[in-house]
Structures are given as structure tokens and as C-alpha cells.
Amino acid sequence: MVDVQHWLSALPPGVVYLIVAAVIGVESMGVPLPGEIVLVSSALLAAAGVVEPEWVATAAAAGAIVGDSIGYAVGRRGGRPLLARLGRRFPRHLGPAQLARAEQSFARHGVWAVFFGRFVALLRILAGPLAGALHVPYRRFLLANAAGGLVWAFGTTYLLFSVGRAAEHWLKDISWAGLVVAILAGLGSTWWLRRRAHRLDTTGAADEAEPVRAGSER
């Protein structure tokens, strides 16, 4: 992530915003890219005054919403065969096991999987194509997609921006206790969303394992 941040810092702000939107957008279409790393790096650059946080967040949200919508359209047209091809192309990220877990989350939680999926790497990549392949109604998908994209983009950007600015201020005053409090407060603001998102992922895996255990008992 340090290398990404260093590379971005050498670019004009407008180019940084475009890269944020493009990387997150392509990732949301179903292609494994380091979208969250790019967002985190750009948010830290905003804390250093290199770029503006509102434009970083806006670019990230736009990339997430548009990319997911394109992924939805591609998934709706290509269906399960498309997801199978993606799995063969990216077996470590989108293999049969990952696809099964993501599909289980959709079956269990519906469009909430789209919202909370923005906070889980696996579902962040698969949410759009999988929702399209499963023929989730687009209006419901778009609402959950937009809400998740906005909360994720602005929440992540301003959390890291605030922590970075607080760190700079308190480090000057050597107020280590204040720095620790600020970091803990910032991390706590996203704890619930992260916990709920990972619960969606783990409950899907547990549901898959239950029939196996039941069968072994018989």
C-alpha cells in the first residue's frame, strides 16, 4: 500500500481521482483489483493535503455505483456461464467455493448482501455480476448498491482523513494518549458494518457445511 500511495502522490490530483474511480469501477464489474487499497492510499494523501477528501470519496462512490451497475448488466446477460468463466480465469478470487458462498449470501439476505457486500472483498467483486445473473430486480439492486457505495466510499475516506489529520496534530504535541483515543474512535465507527458484513459471509459458509455434517451423522 505504501508503494501505491507513493505512486499516486506523484500524479496530479485530477488524475488521482480518475484512477480511484476507474480501479474501483473495474473491480466492481467483477475483475479482482485492489480497489480498497487505492481508496485507502488516496484518503491518506488527502490527510496530507495532496488531494481533496470530498473528491476522493465522490470518485470512489461513482466508481462503485457505476461499476456495480455495469457488472449487473453483464451478469444478467451472461448468466451463470459468465460467472463460471470468471472463476476459471481468477480461481483464487472467484472459484467455485467463493461463488457458492456469495450465492448463499444472496439467497439468505437478498439485496442486503449488496449493501454489506461493499465491505467484504469477495462480495465487493461479485455483487454486481451475481445480482444480474440471479435476476435481482434492478431497482432494488440499485438502491442497495448506491447506499452501500456511498457509505463505504465516504465513510472510509473521511475516517482515514480524520485519523490522519488527528495523528499529524497530536504527534506535533506528543499527545500519544489523544492519538490512541482518536484512532480507536474512528475504527469503532465502522466496526458494526464490518462485523455485520463478515457475518453474512460466514453464515453462508456455515449453511453449506450443515448438510455435510447431517449426512455424516446418518
Image (cartoon, helix red, strand yellow):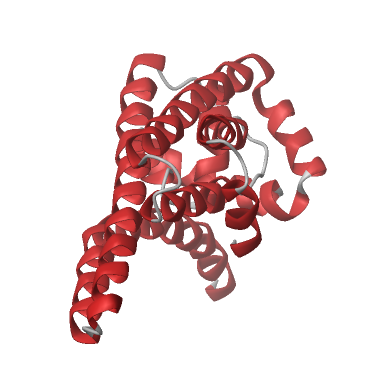
Name the quarter where the C terminus is drawn: bottom right
- Image location (x, y in percent) of residue 11: 61, 40
- Evaluate whether residue 119 shows in this view: yes
Q: Is residue 205 above or below residue 150?
A: below
- Image location (x, y in percent) of residue 102: 53, 45
- Image location (x, y in percent) of residue 188: 23, 66
Q: Which quarter of the picture shows residue 175?
A: bottom left
Q: Which quarter of the picture shows residue 163?
A: bottom left
- Image location (x, y in percent) of residue 100: 59, 47
Q: Is residue 4 above or below residue 54?
A: below
Give the residue at x 38% y 24%: 141
| Count of residue discs | 0
- Whether residue 206 sits left or right of residue 28 in the image: it is left
Give the residue at x 60% y 64%: 2
Give the residue at x 42% y 43%: 118
Give the residue at x 55% y 37%: 16
- Evaluate whether residue 112 shows in this view: no
- Whether residue 33 sits left or right of residue 21 in the image: it is right
**40 or 145: nearer the viewer:** 40
Furthest residue toward front: 172
**191 or 38: nearer the viewer:** 38
- Whether residue 1 sits left or right of residue 89 in the image: it is left
Name the quarter where the N terminus is drawn: bottom right
